[in-house]
Image (spheres, helix red, strand yellow):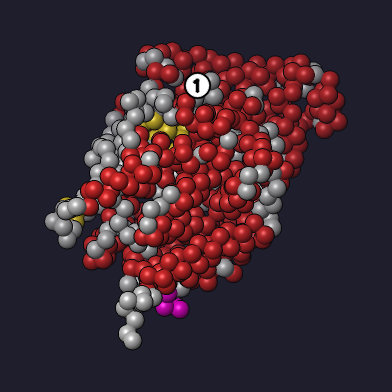
Amino acid sequence: MSTHIAALKLTSFYCQLRNRRQATQGILYRFTGGQWRAVLVWLFATCVPWAWADENPPPAVWDLSHLYKNENEWRQARLRIEDSVSQLETCRGQLATAAHQLADCLQRSSDTYRALGRLYAYSFLAKDIDLNNSATLERHGLADDLFARYTEATSFFEPEILAIGQSTLQRWLSENSALDNFDFKIKNLLRRAPHVLPAREEQILAAAQSPLRLANDAYTVLTNADIPWPEIVLSTGQKAKLTPAAYTQYRGAPVRADREAVFDQFFGTYSQFQQTLATTLAGHIRAQAFAARMRGYPSSLHQALAVDNIPEQVYRTLVSSVNRNLPTLHRYLKLRARKLDLTKPRYYDVYPAISENRTTYTLEASRNLLSEALQPMGERYRNLFDQASRKPWIHAYPAEGKRSGAYQFSAAYDVHPYMLLNHNDDFESLTTYAHEWGHALHSLLANDAQPFEKSEYPTFIAEIASIAHELLLYKYLAANATSDEERLYFLFEELQGLRGTFFRQTQFAEFELAAYEVIDKGGALSAEKLNTLYSDILKRYYGHDEGVTHIDEAYTVEWAYIPHFYRNFYVYQYATSISAAYHLVEKILADDNHAREQYLDLLRAGGSDYPYEVLKKAGVDLASETVYASVVKRCNALMDEIENILDSADAPSMAQTPR
C-alpha cells in the first residue's frame, strides 16, 4: 500500500483558497426602473435552469455518521485497527513461504488500510470544519499517528516480496487467483526494485514520515491560525480582514485602489513572516531530498515522478512548451487591459472580472447548471451526478475556523466521497462546485469498477475529470449567453481559467523545480533566495520587461502563499490535466461516442495501470508537444472571438458615421 497521506485519496486539494463570506441565498438581481420587465421576459423565454428553485434543495452540511455513528464508535474502530496493525507483524518472514501465504498477508494489510482510510476520513473531515477545536485536532493526530504506525508495520512487505524473485512471483500470479487484486502492485514493485531498501532501513524511513511532515504541519497552522492577518477599509467603507481565504475574494475588487491595497497589505504580512515561511518550505524540500538520496534517486524530481512511472519528458516538455507560448499569455493580458481600459497594467490587475456578473449562484443553482452542462457526457454519467448531488456529502458554506479552499475526499471506499467547499454563491463558487464534483464522480466510477486495491487513481489523472467539468460548464454558459457582454464575461472567464491552470500552474512547477534543484545541489533556501527565484520566473511569465504587466518586488513573496508547494511536485499535474481534458472533451463534443467511452474508461481505470499508459489508451500522450499546442490553439480561438466582439462594439454604426 502507499506510504503517504496522499494515498488516502486527498485528490484535488484545490486550494486556490476560495473561502469568502456567505452571500445571500436565492437569485438576486439589482435592476432599476423598467429593467425588471426585460429580465422577466428573458427568463421565461430562455427557461434558464438557475432561475428556478427546487422543491428539494441539495443538503449543505455533510453527514459524518455515514462513517461512524458517533465519536465512541470511531474510538472503538481505532482500537480494532490498532490491533490489526499489530497483528501484521505475524507476516514478517512468511511472505516467501507460499503463494497463498503472500495472498493472505497482502489481503490482511489491504483490509487494515481500507479500515484506516475510513478512520482517517472521519478525523480529517471533522478537523477541517473547525481548526480551532483542540478535541478534533487531537483525534486527527491519533489517526495520523496510527497511519504512520501502519506504514512502519508494513515496511518489511516490499523487501520480502522482492526477495521472492521475479520468476517465482510471475508464476504465483498465474497460479493463484487470490493474488489477482495485487498483480499491478507486484508489477509496480518489481519496477521500483532498485530503490527499495532492506527491511530495517525501510522501517526507519517509514517511522521518519511523521516527523518529516512537521514542516508541512507548521505551515498549515501558521497560515491558517497564527498569523495576525491585517484588516483594511475598502473604498466602499467595508472592513475586510485579509486572511488567505478573504484575499481571494478581494484581490479582484472592481476599484483599482482597493486591489492595490489588498496586495500591499496581504503580501506585506507574508513578508513579515517570510524567514519562518522560507524555513518551513526549505524543511519540506529537504525532507523530500533526504528520502530521494536514501533511495538512490538522482533527484527529488526523479523520485516524485517514479511513484507513478511518469517520464521526466512530460515535466520538461510542459515547461518548455509553455515558455515557448508565453506570447499567447501576453496577448491575453493585453486583451484584458484593453477591456479594463488600463494603460499600465500591474500584477494586481490580473484578477478582476472584465464585467460584473450579478447572478447569485446558490448551491441549488450551481447543481442545476452543472447538470445541464453535463449532457454531452451521456445519460448514465449525468444521472450519477443528479443522484449523488442530492446526498448529504458536502460541507458547503464558510464558517469560523473552517479550512479555506475546497476538496473532495474519497478515502472511505466503502462509504462515498465527501466534499468540502466554501461556497459564496458567486461565479467562482459555481466553477469550484463543478470542479470538485468532477473528482467525486471520478471516485464513484473508479470505486464501482475496481476492487479496493486498484481503485485509488493517481494524482496524474486526478484533475482531468474536474477540469472537464469546468470546460463543459464554460461552454454551456457561453452558448446560452443572451448578450455580447454576457458572452464576453464567460469567454474571459474560460481564458482566466486557462491562465490560472495552464500557465500559472506551470509557472509554479518551474519555480518548484528551481527550488528543489538548489537543495539537490547542496545549496540553501532563504527568503531572499526564494524571492529572487520567484521574481525572475513571475516577471518572465507576465511580460514585465516587455511592458505587458508590471511586477512589484513586494509581491514576489507570493511563493509563501501557495500551499501546493508542500505537496511535492503536485502543481504541474494541473497543467497536464487541463491539456488532457481539453483534448478529450473536444472529441466528446464532436459527438464521438467512442471518445466518450474512452474517457469513461479512463475514469473507471482507477489505479489499475500506470496513469501515463491509461492516458495513452485514451489517445493522449503528455510527453508530446501536440497536446499542449491544442490548449494554446483554444486560447487563441477564444481571443479571436473576443476581439471580434470588441471590434464590432468599437466600430461606428451607420447612423453615427458622418456624411
Q: Quadrant of residue 557?
A: bottom left
Q: Amino acid at mark 1?
A: Val
Q: SS at mark 1? A: loop
- Give percent across and percent down for residue 419: 42, 33
Side of 175 where 182 appears, left or right:
left
Is residue 512 placed above or below 533 in the rendered structure?
Answer: above
Report the front residue among 91 and 425. 425
Q: Residue at x 33, y 68 (%)?
A: 340
Specify start and end residues of the magenta stretch as a single range. Answer: 544-548
Q: Answer whether residue 147 is visible to the viewer in this image.
A: no
> Within 10 angstroms of label 1, few (less than 14), some, or many (20 or more) residues?
few
Q: In the rendering, at what x and y percent does residue 367 appear?
A: 40, 35
* Residue found at the very far left of the displayed protein: 237
The picture places residue 580, in percent across and down from the top left corner, at 61, 50
Q: Which residue is mark 1?
A: 415
Vertical order, 658 against 159 (above or below) = below
The quarter of the picture where the N terminus appears is top right
Residue toward you, 639 or 222: 639
Label total for image = 1
The residue under the point 56% across, 32% down is 379
Q: What secondary structure do most residues of the magenta stretch adopt?
A: loop
- Nearer to me, 505 or 99: 505
Is 594 magenta? The answer is no
The correct choice, above or below, for 426 with respect to 119 in the image is below
The structure residue drawn at horizontal position 36% and vertical position 17%, both measured from the top left corner, is 71
Q: Is residue 192 left or right of residue 218?
A: right
Q: Position of residue 445 (x, y in %)?
A: 58, 30
